Image (cartoon, rainbow, N blue to C red):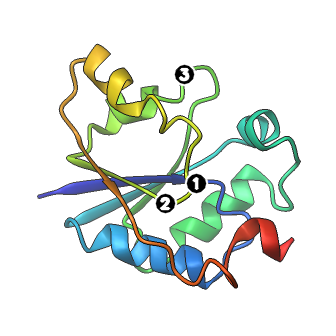
Amino acid sequence: MVTVMVFGSFDLMHPGHLNFLRQAKSYGDKLVAVVARDSSIQKIKNFTPKYSERDRLEHIRDMPMVDKGVLGYEKDPYEIVEEINPDIICLGYDQNSYSDNLEEELKKREMEIKIIRLSPYRPDLYKSSKLK
């Protein structure tokens, strides 16, 4: 059983998110979606999400391609990776938070996880920052 992990805010769900989740699911048998905490979004993106972390978690759990939805950790964002221990982490084409030093962090924690950068889906139309 191949477990794939993705991360995201998943605040305003749109076709780009659905494509992202479908692409990620195609790499394995089980898709785990990690929903960013409200405090992490505030810190990284400098705004408050429209939906609470609990609402966003419920939305992601309702997605048919998501097998498990969990909240990330506030103090150590890589702790959830250690806990789930996926075979693959799929990143969005424009995901930079925590992904810049992801390989280095995984090596430091002695974890061998394949990292795949997914393709964009109509970023001219379906990009969260454009849809706000």
Please tell me which residue is depicted at 70% across the width and 85% down the height of the picture: 125
Residue 67 position, x and y percent, is: 36, 66
Extreme-top residue of the structure: 108
- Residue 103 position (above or below residue 34): above
Secondary structure type for disc 2: loop
Quadrant into which the C terminus falls = bottom right
The reply to whether callout 1 and callout 2 are in contact (CB within 8 Å) is: yes
Query: In terms of sequence position, does the residue under pointer 3 or pointer 1 come before the other?
Result: 1
Task: Report the amino acid beneath label 2.
Answer: Gly
How far is mark 1 from mark 2, CA to CA? 9 Å
Reading the image, the residue beneath label 2 is 92
Task: Report the amino acid beneath label 3.
Answer: Asp
Reading the image, the residue beneath label 3 is 76
Task: Report the amino acid beneath label 1.
Answer: Gly
Please tell me which residue is depicted at 55% across the width and 51% down the height of the picture: 95
Splitting the image into 4 quarters, where does residue 24 fall? bottom left
